[in-house]
Amino acid sequence: MAKGKREVIRLEGVKKYYFMGENIVKAVDGVDMVINHGDFVAIMGPSGSGKSTTMNLVGSLDLPTDGEIYLDGHNIARLSESSLAQIRGKKIGFIFQSFNLIPNLTAKENIMLPMLFQGLRIDERELKAEKLLELVELTDRKNHYPNQLSGGQQQRVAIARALANDPDVILADEPTGNLDTKTGEKVMNFLEEFNRKGKTIIMVTHDPELAKEHAKIVYWMKDGKIEKTTKTKKAR
C-alpha cells in the first residue's frame, strides 16, 4: 500500500464460477486488486470479460466461489446476507446504467429510500434529500416521477441516491451507457467532483476514452482475469 494511503478494498485470488451442467463458466478467474481511499478506478474490458461480475463482488451483491474480499479490513466474502446488506447500506453507493429508480416514487422519495433502511427519522431523510437534490441541480424536479424525467436527470437522481448514506465507496456500472455525450460528460463531472471531495469511485466501462479521461487507475480485464493495470495522467 502506498505511503499515506488507506486501503479500502482488497481482492485476493477472487474467483466466480457458474456451473451449468457439465460446463463451468469462469466469469472471474483469480483476480487480485487493491483500491485505496480516494482512488478513481476504472475496470475496463469487452462484454463478457468479467468486469461487471467483479464490481458485483466488490459491492457484496454476489459472493465469490473462491478467494477473499476485504472492505476496510473485514472479509466480506464470509459474511451472512444480513451483514452484507448492512455493509452495502452504509459503506457502498451504487449507480447503475439502467438507473434502477423506483417508478412509483418521486425523485426525492427515491433519494430518501436508502436512508429509511438505516433508520433515519423522516425529517432527517427529507432534509438530506433536499440537500442532495440541490447538489445534483434537480431541486425543481424533486416531486417528479422517473417517467417525467430525462435520462440524464434520472441518472443524477441515481447519483444522489447513491450518496444518501454518505458511503465511502461509489460503484458506477456503465454510468453514461444510456446517455448522450453531453449529458454523459455532466454525469462524469459530478463523479469527478465527488472524488475530489474524498469519495472512492469504482467505475465499470467498456469505453477506453472514458476510463483514460476520468479515472486515475485502469484495470484491463479479459476472460475473467486482469490483463494489465495502467495509471492515467490523472494519477500524476
Image (cartoon, rainbow, N blue to C red):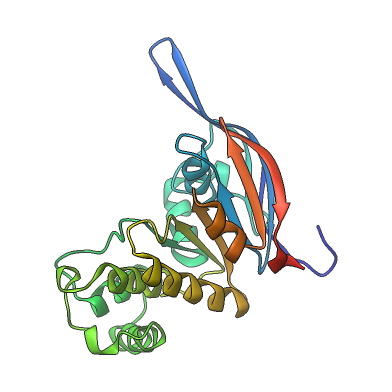
The extreme top residue here reads 22
| Residue 78 sits above or below residue 156 on the image | above
Percent across and percent down for residue 48 are 46, 34
In the rendering, at what x and y percent does residue 132 appear? 39, 83
Give whichever of 26, 179 is nearer the camera.
179
Q: Nearer the viewer, residue 180 or 106?
A: 180
Q: In the displayed structure, does residue 39 sit left or right of residue 205?
A: right
Picture coordinates of residue 55 (x, y %)? 51, 48
Horizontal arrangement in the rendering, residue 144 relative to residue 91 (left or right): left
Tell me residue 185's x, y (percent).
Answer: 45, 71
Residue 196, can we see it? yes
> In this image, 12 relative to 57: left or right?
right
Can you say which quadrant of the picture contains the N terminus? bottom right
Quarter-of-image position of residue 145? bottom left
Which corner quadrant of the image does residue 45 belong to? top right
- Would residue 41 appear left or right of 104 to someone viewing this image? right
Q: How many marks?
A: 0
Task: Reply above or below: 134 against 175.
Answer: below
Residue at 49% across, 48% down: 206
Residue lying at the far right of the rendered structure = 3
